[in-house]
Amino acid sequence: MSSSSRSYIIVGAGVFGVSTAYYLIKKYPDASITLVDRDAYDADSRVAASWDWNKVVRADYDDIVYCHMGLEAQDIFESDPLWQPYFHQTGIYWMCRTDYAQDVIDNYQKLGRKSDLMYGGLFDDADYTDVKEVLINKTSGWAAAGDCLVAVTRAILDMGVKYVTAEVNNLVFDGSGQCTGVRTVKGDIIKASHTILSTGAYTSKLLEHSARSSGNSGLQAGSRIVAGGITTGMTKLSDELYPKYAKMPVGVQGYRAEQGPFIGSLPPTKDKELKWWGQTIFRNTQEVLPGRFISMPPSGSDYKQWDISPKMRQDIDHANNVFYGNRGKTWKMEKHRVCWDAFTSNGDFIISPHSASKGLYVATCGNFHGWKFFPVVGKYVVQMLEGDLPDNLVQKWAWDREQTDPALFPDHPRIEMKDMLEQRDSRL
Ligand SMILES: Cc1cc2nc3c(=O)[nH]c(=O)nc-3n(C[C@H](O)[C@H](O)[C@H](O)COP(=O)(O)OP(=O)(O)OC[C@H]3O[C@@H](n4cnc5c(N)ncnc54)[C@H](O)[C@@H]3O)c2cc1C
Ligand SMILES: *[C@@H]1O[C@H](CO)[C@@H](O)[C@H](O)[C@H]1NC(C)=O
């Protein structure tokens, strides 16, 4: 296929979609590359998990593939003028309750980086119950996520990528079942030789609709993808407090799988807002079509992400307490949001052709840790599109792969969102 006859539709302009478009336009400047997203890239409010005030950037992984990718990404964050302005190298402070710290150090040694461990008591009022080790990595940090996403999107539009603001209702296929593009809710059809789904938490719902309209039930995601939501919340630090926290490291409380996911506290943004994410990752199982139940973000164009229940607030209050104890008691909690991401059973991405239709590809499932790979993930997606992905990654990220037991994965959504909504605020 010559460069100018290649055409790509990428549904979803989060980090997976935008990074893919970036690597495609760099490789094929004349190709037709269209990002389709329900939200304008510079909208005031977006549903993308990638669109956020801040995200943790680290290479500290006990999985060597993500450790390696994290190092690659961080090299770009530190040096490339497109990404560098959004990266803050504040360090990270892990309070570990497993052997995670040692596994991380072993990985850095295997990859030839020296590790400089320090033990200390920066978060002195934090909850250290059962903490086995504290891992401090001074070269990790955080990124101004939404600002970075908008800046990179703007840059690729300048390079020739097209952006269509529209909600996709379903995929469209030719007579042989090959995917030929998408149909929007308004009824417009956009066609391309390659259609890539980077639709995050919405992926299963889009595939259900596409399976129903085409009659190809093989398109359904089944247990491969579970939409999971989590609460975040912020406090605005006073002018007096801000200088003390301005250069703080990212804080992470690590737990064993039976106890639940890592929870975290992110250093203040330029608006002096310090953020937490909670410990409860929930699914939202609904009847998407008659007889079909899947977890999906709440319906409505904003996934109801700003509707916060008292239990969700409590989750953030708990996070505040285990990081700051008495110091945080008087902080006013505001700007709560539910953020939706796509989960697989073990935290691995899906970067793969879809086995039920030619021309259709899936590149998403950030599993709550995908943002930091923004500068590199698209490179791997392009390798996948061209059949050049190394064998170990083909298998690791395949659409069809063995489903591991999600109980072993601390982040896997365990409870239903309705259980987060039931308790009513007695003051109301
Ligand atoms: C609270 C929270 C904290 C996190 N913290 C971190 C962190 O600190 N570090 C880190 O590395 N990762 C973190 N993550 C994970 C990371 O944010 C995600 O893994 C990553 O952003 C997922 O990117 P994506 O491109 O797959 O999906 P998204 O960013 O969700 O993008 C999907 C896009 O698809 C669009 N879309 C979906 N369906 C349709 C449709 N039918 N039609 C049109 N458009 C559609 C949506 O509008 C959206 O823009 C966090 C996630 C959450 C929720
Ligand atoms: C911290 O992370 C960097 C990569 O950003 C790595 O090279 C280094 O070895 C890590 N240090 C520790 C203490 O683990």
Image (cartoon, rainbow, N blue to C red):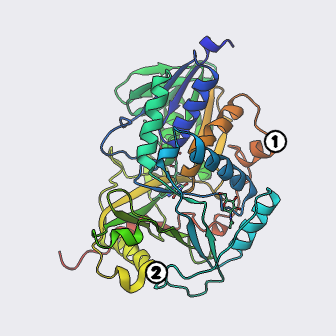
Give the residue at mark 2: 322
Q: Quadrant of residue 25?
A: top right
Q: CA distance from mark 2 to mark 1?
A: 42 Å
Q: Earlier in the sequence, mark 2 or mark 1?
A: 2
* Marker disc for residue 391: 1
Q: Is residue 160 above or below residue 356?
A: above
Question: Label 1: few (<14), some or many (≥20) within 10 Å?
Answer: few
* 359 sits left or right of 14 in the view: right
**Residue 268 location (% of width, % of height):** 39, 63
- The three-letter amino acid code for the residue at tag 2 is Val
The picture quadrant for ligand 2 comes to bottom right
**Residue 380 location (% of width, % of height):** 68, 38
Query: Which residue: 30% across, 72% down?
Result: 310
Determine contact: label 2, label 1, CB under 8 Å: no
Query: Looking at the image, which is closer to me, 46 or 205?
Result: 46
Q: How many marks?
A: 2
Specify the quadrant that holds the C terminus: bottom left
Label 2 vs label 1, nearer the camera = 2
- The three-letter amino acid code for the residue at tag 1 is Asp
**Residue 354 location (% of width, % of height):** 65, 36
Q: Secondary structure at mark 1?
A: helix
Query: Which residue: 61% across, 86% down?
Result: 130
Q: Is mark 2 within 8 Å of ligand 1?
A: no
| Residue 67 in view in this figure | yes
**Residue 127 location (% of width, % of height):** 50, 84
Q: Quadrant of residue 30?
A: top right
Q: Secondary structure at mark 2?
A: helix
Q: Quadrant of residue 184?
A: top left
Question: Label 2: few (<14), some or many (≥20) within 10 Å?
Answer: many
